[in-house]
Amino acid sequence: MPQLLRVATAGSVDDGKSTLIGRLLYDSKAIFEDQLEAVERTSRERGDEHADLALLTDGLRAEREQGITIDVAHRYFATPHRKFIIADTPGHEQYTRNMVTGASTADLALILVDARKGILEQTRRHAFIASLLGIPHLVLCVNKMDLVGWSEERFEEIKEEFRQFAIKLEVHDLTFIPVSALRGDNIAQRTANMAWYGGASLLHYLEQVHVASDRNLIDARFPVQYVVRPQRRTDSALHDFRGYAGTVASGVFKPGDEVVVLPSGFTSTVSAIWGPGGTRLDEAFAPSAVCVQLADQLDVGRGDVLCRPNNRPLVGQELDAMVCWFSEQSSLTPDARYTLLHTTRATRASVARLDYRLDVNTLHRDESAQSLSLNEIGRVQLRTSQPLMFDPYRRNHVTGSFILVDESTHNTVAAGMITGPTLSRSKVVWHAAAVSRDERATRGRTVWLTGLSASGKSTVAVELERRLVAAGVPAYRLDGDNLRHGLNADLGFSAEDRAENVRRVGAVAQLLADSGVVAIASLISPYRADRDRVREQHRAAGLDFVEVFVDTPVEQCEARDPKGMYAKARAGEITGFTGVDDPYEAPEHAELVLRPGDGTPTEQAERIMELLRRDH
């Protein structure tokens, strides 16, 4: 059976999304003759020079009159290699919410750019939303190449501009393809008009892209939608039947598996799994719609979740989430109340706090924001009246997503992606120590070494720690790589994860410094704002923060490359590597800058020692 690929198209107005989909349908022989005749007839009536293939997806009268896509249109077609469902999502900013819903189940996002206009605000917005939704594959189609003379230079210019923006996002697989949707160049077949392009055509790429490994087959989650009980007593074999119908959110379930029911915590064993039509199944995996029968008679109802006893989702009533606001008539504000729909459970929820509003162009966080309006995205803290069984969205799209519904109008006003549980500020208090800093034997501080991979900062940090301890000064080294084996083992390398990595290390360093220890933090920490935030927190706590910039040129770092990471990044085996396809923001006010000409690691460590003695 051919594998299914769900594709969401996005981009700005008039970038050619509908035309591209129409061309894909036409070139893959997925259009009936009467459909093509209707398109040709309508095109002639409108005075078009040729058949407008965009009419195959723009079905609403308003869409045809205005020449824009308003609603999400789904089109289905197949090739010998794969089945496809393509969602033609709107490009107009007013209908960004429709893009969110259309892309929420996609395996791949296809973002179009007009080669004449380049990267626009809406292009960045859709790319960010695709990243926020956790779509693992992103294809940037530079369309209308015929209108720029098939220029390789223009393609490379757009490619580089988008790459610089994408490296700030969590994009695992990024591909660039130059096309002309109107003429069919590089759509189903490679074109001779762009001989300089050595990649695959769009259709060939869509047929070959690997998506099987994107599914979460580890975390078994089965939200119960309906309790199946016999309605007629005539069949004695079904008299005592009790099953639980729903769709497998993730993982695999088999007869004989031990499961736990949440939130009650009762355990049982799967006795049978039934598919559509009463077919008995040997296993069920996402996104199968099945009926699960348990060996024990338990109190299980709609909204409960079946999972493995040793692999459970988080359970709580307070959570952090990224929210995209959909409503034109209202805005999200703190203390507002909504109905929250999560898997098969509905519960009341209130907005405890708006942490920040995100600028999708610069990814700047506006922490002074008081509300979210139409199409704006922000991070919020929610409190629900009933406990939710959830996973972080990036781990599980089903149990990590929700929608908010206005209680008075019953309109869907927002879609949300859960980032994790909230540590309630009202229940956590700071317990003051009975020992003041002046009563401790030593004075603590944080020395923060930052620089590119292979810059030499870790070597200097090791030597600094050795010299401090030898001098009778308690010191401890917080190495970035070491911490990713424990404290930060759950973090990746997206901009958000890098920020969280720095936040955690900064918090640990602050505790060590408060105890009288010199904390030596050695990690790339590429973003200036994250480091400055740690500095400010130390300043507010009355602790010294010394930033040391190990300023080794990237060429020299790459020549060293002890872990082979630069070589892998250059070969495209890894993405988002600082110094290659991810930026490094050098400190503007570092207390000390160390360069290769400043001597050996021992001599550089001695320079830091001198600085610490001078500031003591």
Image (cartoon, grey):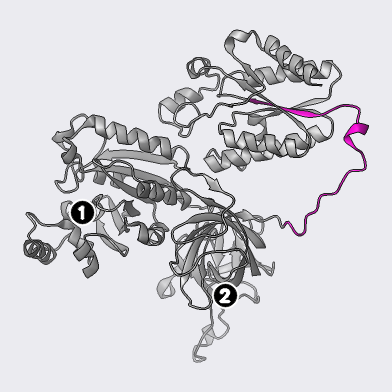
Secondary element under disc 1, as helix, strand or loop, is helix
Residue 315 position (above or below residue 161)? below
* Residue 582 tag number: none
Q: What label sits on residue 19 in the rendered view?
A: 1
Label 1: few (<14), some (14–19) or many (≥20) C-alpha neighbours in 10 Å: many
Q: Is residue 508 visible?
A: no
Above or below 515: residue 411: below
Above/below status of 215 relative to 328? above
Where does the image place residue 486, in percent across and percent down from the top left? 68, 38
- Tell me, yes or no, whether the two marked residues, 2 and 1, touch with CB atoms within 8 Å: no
Residue 384 locus on image (x, y percent): 64, 68
Q: Residue at x 44, y 75 (%)?
A: 278
Dot 2 alpha-carbon crowd within 10 angstroms: few under 14, some 14 to 19, many 20 or more: some
Q: Which residue type carries mark 2?
A: Arg
Specify whether residue 442 is painted magenta: yes
The amino acid type of the residue labelled 1 equals Thr
Q: CA distance from mark 2 to mark 1?
A: 43 Å
- How far from the left and from the top, in percent, is residue 449? 65, 24
Residue under numbered circle 2? 302
Q: Which residue shows up at 59% across the image and 65% down it?
A: 306
Which residues fall within the magenta stretch?
A: 425-449
Which image quarter holds the C terminus? top right
Residue 420 among magenta residues: no
